[in-house]
Image (spheres, rainbow, N blue to C red):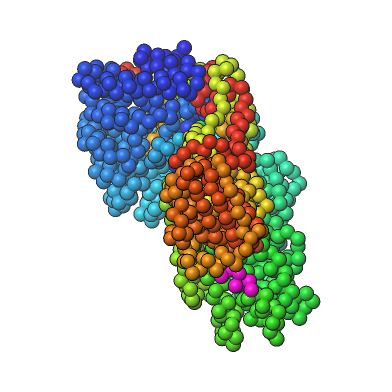
């Protein structure tokens, strides 16, 4: 299962953090700091998987943003790697050509989208169309 | 520019982005938090829109890393709002700010339940999402039936049902009892007939969790999973939106195959055939393509299929195919290389993730036929492997050597080589194990003894090698006594050479070895006996209770002659049992959602293939308990009783310090207790602190950032110490614990214990920040009269962590010179370097002693004059009332003996000075003051050693002239090396890289 999802820029600013396991705030800060250090220093030629404590982080970089998923050690790495890409495609579709600023100013939308995509640390919906339509429904309610 | 749709929120975010440094950001955030607090005080006046806006702002502030605890209540209370927009914010922000352990969450439980059972679909979704993400036990117990109802309801849209499926999964993970197996298995099977792939994806995750606990109950789901896999693999009836780069939902395929791996076999021949056909199709139909996403997705499916084949294929129908397929992958990049060769090459890959996997694989594929090659390859690799992997490597090499040893002497060779090459990374368990082996195999004992003897000849050997060699030679040295260079006396000399260089835990082992050597020397060698006895005598006054006790006991025992034979006889054989090393590797806790999945997969992957086996090392604090079965001739008060008073659990901080140690389970008690019985071995605490690689690339990044965003000259960032260093030092000269140094980033505390000429000091290095301190270096610059041994100081101190560095001190000779600690670290771009005087001063080696008139005068008279008795008139004395002067002396362990001198203006003082060269030395002092002129006095100091007399006289003089009472600021700090703070700071460097607001886009 996914333990947490982090969106961080190269400087380590957290743009989105979602935890599916109960952590204290101080522990969250530590995790965010450590994961950032772990991924930002890795050679782009290396694998997109890196062990983190008793788990592993699957990460991918898009422009200046790092998307990191922390999953169980036995989980299928490639499946989660593509799960990141699917999420980025959804964001890209929703914001039409997403950039970091979209995510900064609309962080609340990103949380909404994520909640339609992943729940309880598991994939909930893999259809881009279903999620985008759902977001449309929700926007009408606001 | 993208806007949030809430003006106030967008403006706030812009403001934050425009802050030029962390400080400005903090000010802006504080202002906003103040505003939010005030507004919420008068909640009635707030419109729903405003409430929503403020709660979003709080979430944003929280993401920036600030504490918004005061807002928890506001977020939770919005959940009960009647309208969607506020309710939505309440649910989402609560899910982000709180976790299942927060009490506030209970307040919402009723509202959440009403939303779940209510008719409003949107509210249902919100509630299911929050419970799915942060629901705890209480939620599980009160909500599970309602969530189950939603999942199987025919009137709910798939939208609600897929959320219900995952919400139920969460509740099940919190408390498996909430799903009643009898009733639920059939429902679960029905759920797998679902056509909507969103619901199916969610349900499959639920199924994986259920079957991982109890596959028998869900037997009826097996054929359905095969059907789903067929449907996907053949791309039958899959809506376009569920294909990803042309592949029908790779995630659902992977999940389905994962679920199938929890069933031990597929018995039904038809189902089995169908499944194998699908798997065959996947194995054969996957090609390497250009599009990276498509490639990844199809290989995600392929690798899961391979895992499933290996799990199911007892008859090896498809195994050959799989193996050749694996071979194909490998040959894509590296043709004509043997599989083993390839993996060994991967051990040298620059990517640590690949290296770890390669190590796992080598470990997993090792058997008796290739063990020698693999272990030797690992030993070879050990020399170049980075620190993060060495411990794991040595553990694995040790296990393989034990498991597949073609002969036992080879095993001994391997372990000794291991200790020799990577002593720092060889956990105690490894050498305990080799000792067990040798003890239990008589044939091996002479060989092991001879090998141990060989290693002792090497010029510089690791301390662990000293331990294991000493132990083996103590036990079995007599078996090789006839060989050249192996007589008891020669063995003793060889081992005793190492004594001055080893830590206290090893000294204990050496003392045991001496006792055993003594016992084994036939005929008795009086010279050797005297030599060993004098060593025991010397350690009878050791500051370490363990050593002291051993010295006293061994001395007493070894004088008993024949009786010694029984007590000091060879250790009995250890009971045969599973290797604690292997057990450790197996027991290593892997924290995953589906526990039994690990066991199943672990079996497939040949027992222990997880890369996270790191031997735990608990830094041992204080003295170990007296080993059971050891005769307790002397009871000693614990010397370390108050060490624990210092804040912060030392073990916690050690664990923080060692990012590489992931395993916190207690050490396997059984093997330890065996060896602790006779030996009471202590692991050196420093060995668990691995140096961390420094982070130059990150620092470079910071510099670039700094020049890009911060205007030059904004921060002239020099690090200033907090408090007066000199004053702190002076205070510590009379106290034994306190703060030695502090600046905005670090606090260094000390705590010391003194006993005769020994001192045990602990430096507490506490990082005060949320960022780590790197390049930490502590170099001891001891004066010649002190022997100091500082344990390893970690290169990185993690955020808010405290590390402890023990420092052992032996006072060799009387001297007033002061030890200096050259301490430096980096924080951001600031290099801080301070030279700190350590409070290891002459008076620490004084012990107060009260002396009577009858004792004083004969002593005083027996020391007639220079150089043993020195007299001096001291001028420029800071005028002190006599009583204050007496207090001052007592503070330095100089006992004022009232009534000895008939003149009330005079003081008579006595003390005992300890050093290795002088041993205990009685010192007598007489101070004659002049009531008419308190700025001068006459001082006479006498002792049996001229240097002691001189140094003590000068020391007292310094104290009287300088006035070092803890409450006053010294006017002129005494000489050696004034502390200097040298910030070597790059211009205008920000202190926190994370503080810089990215404006990259």
Q: Per the image, is B537 magenta? A: yes
- B257 shown above or below B547: above
Is most of the magenta stretch helix, strand or loop? helix
Query: Which residue lies at the image location 60% right of the left edge and 19% below the top edge?
Result: B707
| Residue situated furthest front in the rendering | B932
Nearer to the camera, B773 or A72: B773
- Percent position (x, y) of residue B583? 52, 62
The reply, left or right, for residue B156 in relation to residue B614 is: left
Nearer to the camera, B585 or B461: B461
Query: Which residue lies at the image location 35% right of the left edge and 29% below the top edge?
Result: B68
Determine the image quadrant of residue B446: bottom right
- Identify the magenta region: B534-541
| Residue situated furthest bottom in the rendering | B562
- Percent position (x, y) of residue B676? 53, 69
- B686 shown above or below B278: below
Q: Is residue B259 visible?
A: no
Query: Which residue lies at the image location 42% right of the left edge and 38% below the top edge?
Result: A26
- Percent position (x, y) of residue B879? 48, 42
- Percent position (x, y) of residue B903? 46, 56
- B335 shown above or below B362: above
The reply, left or right, for residue B112 in relation to residue B734 is: left
Q: Per the image, is B142 magenta? A: no
Nearer to the camera, B971 or B733: B971
Q: How many marks?
A: 0
Q: Quadrant of the C terminus of chain B?
A: top right
Determine the image quadrant of residue B940: bottom right
Query: Which residue lies at the image location 49% right of the left edge and 76% below the top edge?
Result: B633
Q: Is residue B58 visible?
A: yes
The reply, left or right, for residue B186 in relation to residue B832 is: left
């Amino acid at each position: 299962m996914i333990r947490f999802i982090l969106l961080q820029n190269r400087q380590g600013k957290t743009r989105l953090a979602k935890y599916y396991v109960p952590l204290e705030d101080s522990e969250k800060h530590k995790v965010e700091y450590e994961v950032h250090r772990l991924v930002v220093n890795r050679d782009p030629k290396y694998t997109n998987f890196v062990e983190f404590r008793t788990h592993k982080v699957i990460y991918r970089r898009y422009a200046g943003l790092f998307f990191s998923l922390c999953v169980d050690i036995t989980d299928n790495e490639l499946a989660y790697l593509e799960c990141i890409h699917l999420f980025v495609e959804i964001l890209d579709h929703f914001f039409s050509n997403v950039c970091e600023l979209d995510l900064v100013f609309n962080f609340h939308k990103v949380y909404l989208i994520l909640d339609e995509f992943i729940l309880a640390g598991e994939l909930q919906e893999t259809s881009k169309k279903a999620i985008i339509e759902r977001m449309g429904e929700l926007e009408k309610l606001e | 520019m993208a806007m949030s749709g809430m003006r106030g929120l967008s403006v706030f975010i812009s403001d934050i982005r425009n802050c030029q440094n962390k400080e400005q950001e903090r000010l802006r955030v504080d202002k906003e938090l103040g505003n939010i607090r005030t507004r919420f005080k008068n909640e009635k006046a707030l419109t729903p829109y405003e409430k929503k806006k403020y709660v979003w702002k709080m979430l944003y502030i929280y993401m920036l890393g600030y504490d918004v605890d005061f807002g928890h209540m506001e977020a939770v209370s919005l959940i009960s709002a009647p309208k969607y927009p506020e309710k939505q914010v309440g649910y989402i922000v609560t899910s982000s700010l709180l976790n299942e352990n927060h009490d506030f969450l209970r307040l919402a439980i009723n509202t959440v339940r009403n939303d779940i059972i209510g008719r409003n679909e949107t509210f249902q979704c919100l509630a299911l999402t929050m419970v799915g993400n942060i629901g705890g036990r209480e939620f599980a117990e009160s909500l599970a039936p309602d969530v189950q109802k939603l999942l199987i309801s025919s009137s709910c849209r798939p939208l609600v049902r897929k959320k219900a499926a995952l919400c139920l999964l969460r509740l099940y993970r919190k408390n498996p009892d909430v799903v009643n197996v009898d009733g639920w298995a059939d429902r679960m099977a029905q759920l797998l007939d679902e056509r909507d792939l969103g619901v199916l994806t969610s349900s499959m995750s639920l199924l994986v969790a259920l079957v991982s606990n109890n596959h028998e109950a869900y037997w009826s789901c097996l054929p359905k999973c095969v059907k789903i896999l067929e449907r996907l693999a053949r791309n039958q009836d899959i809506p376009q939106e569920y294909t990803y780069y042309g592949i029908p939902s790779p995630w659902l395929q992977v999940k389905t195959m994962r679920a199938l791996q929890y069933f031990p076999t597929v018995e039904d021949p038809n189902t089995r055939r169908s499944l194998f056909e699908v798997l065959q199709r996947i194995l054969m139909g996957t090609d390497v393509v250009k599009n990276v996403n498509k490639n990844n997705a199809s290989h995600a499916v392929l690798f899961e299929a391979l895992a499933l084949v290996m799990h199911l294929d007892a008859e090896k129908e498809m195994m050959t195919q799989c193996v050749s397929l694996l071979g194909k992958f490998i040959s894509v990049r590296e043709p004509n290389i043997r599989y083993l060769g390839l993996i060994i090459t991967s051990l040298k890959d620059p990517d640590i993730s690949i290296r770890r996997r390669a190590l796992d694989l080598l470990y997993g594929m090792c058997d008796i036929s290739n063990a020698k090659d693999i272990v030797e390859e690992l030993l070879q690799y050990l020399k170049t492997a980075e620190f993060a992997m060495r411990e794991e490597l040595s553990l694995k090499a040790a296990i393989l050597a034990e498991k597949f040893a073609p002969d036992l002497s080879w095993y001994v060779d391997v372990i000794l080589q291991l200790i020799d090459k990577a002593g720092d990374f060889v956990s105690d368990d490894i050498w305990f194990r080799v000792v067990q082996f040798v003890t239990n195999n008589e044939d091996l004992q002479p060989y092991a003894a001879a090998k141990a003897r060989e290693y002792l000849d090497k010029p510089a050997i690791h301390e662990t090698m000293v331990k294991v060699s000493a132990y083996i030679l103590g036990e079995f040295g007599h078996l090789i006594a006839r060989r050249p260079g192996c007589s008891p006396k020669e063995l003793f000399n060889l081992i005793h050479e190492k004594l001055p260089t080893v830590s206290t835990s090893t000294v204990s082992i050496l003392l045991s070895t001496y006792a055993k050597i003594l016992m084994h020397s036939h005929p008795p060698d009086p010279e050797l006996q005297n030599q060993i006895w004098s060593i025991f005598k010397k350690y009878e006054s050791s500051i370490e209770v363990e050593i002291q006790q051993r010295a006293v006991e061994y001395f007493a025992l070894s004088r008993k002659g024949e009786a010694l034979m029984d007590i000091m006889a060879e250790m009995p054989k250890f009971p045969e049992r599973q290797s604690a090393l292997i057990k450790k590797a197996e027991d290593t806790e892997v924290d995953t959602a589906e526990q039994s999945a690990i066991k199943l997969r672990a079996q497939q992957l040949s027992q222990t293939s997880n890369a996270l086996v790191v031997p735990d090392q608990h830094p041992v604090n204080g003295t170990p308990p007296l080993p059971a079965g050891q005769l307790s001739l002397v009871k000693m008060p614990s010397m370390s009783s108050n060490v624990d008073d210092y804040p912060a659990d030392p073990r916690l901080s050690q664990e923080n310090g060692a990012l590489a140690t992931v395993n916190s389970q207690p050490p396997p008690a059984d093997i330890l207790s065996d060896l602790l019985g006779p030996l009471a071995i202590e692991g050196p605490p420093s060995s668990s602190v691995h140096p961390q690689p420094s982070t130059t690339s990150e620092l470079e990044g910071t510099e670039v950032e700094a020049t890009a965003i911060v205007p030059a000259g904004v921060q002239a960032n020099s690090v200033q110490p907090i408090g007066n260093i000199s004053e702190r030092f002076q205070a510590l000269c009379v106290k034994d614990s306190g703060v030695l140094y502090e600046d905005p980033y670090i606090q260094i505390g000390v705590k010391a214990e003194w006993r005769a000429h020994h001192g045990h000091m602990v430096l507490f290095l506490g990082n005060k920040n949320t960022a780590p301190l790197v390049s930490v270096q502590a170099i001891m610059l001891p004066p010649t009269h002190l022997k100091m041994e500082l344990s390893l100081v970690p290169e990185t101190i993690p955020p808010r962590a405290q590390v402890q560095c023990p420092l052992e001190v032996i006072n060799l000779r009387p001297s007033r010179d002061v030890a200096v600690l050259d301490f430096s670290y980096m924080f951001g771009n600031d290099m801080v370097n301070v030279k700190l005087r350590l409070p290891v001063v002459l008076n620490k080696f004084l012990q107060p002693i009260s002396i009577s008139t009858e004792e004083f005068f004969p002593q005083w008279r027996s020391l007639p004059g220079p150089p043993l008795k020195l007299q001096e008139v001291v001028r420029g004395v800071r005028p002190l009332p006599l009583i204050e002067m007496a207090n001052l002396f007592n503070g330095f362990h100089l006992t004022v003996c009232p009534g000895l001198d008939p003149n009330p203006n005079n003081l008579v003082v006595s003390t005992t000075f300890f050093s290795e060269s002088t041993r205990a030395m009685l010192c007598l002092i007489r101070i004659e003051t002049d009531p008419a002129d308190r700025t001068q006095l006459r001082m006479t100091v006498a002792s049996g050693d001229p240097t002691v007399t001189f140094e003590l006289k000068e020391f007292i003089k310094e104290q009287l002239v300088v006035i070092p009472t803890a409450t006053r600021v010294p006017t002129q700090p005494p000489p050696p090396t004034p502390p200097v703070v040298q910030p070597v700071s790059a211009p205008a460097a920000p202190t926190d890289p994370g503080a810089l607001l990215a404006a990259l886009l």
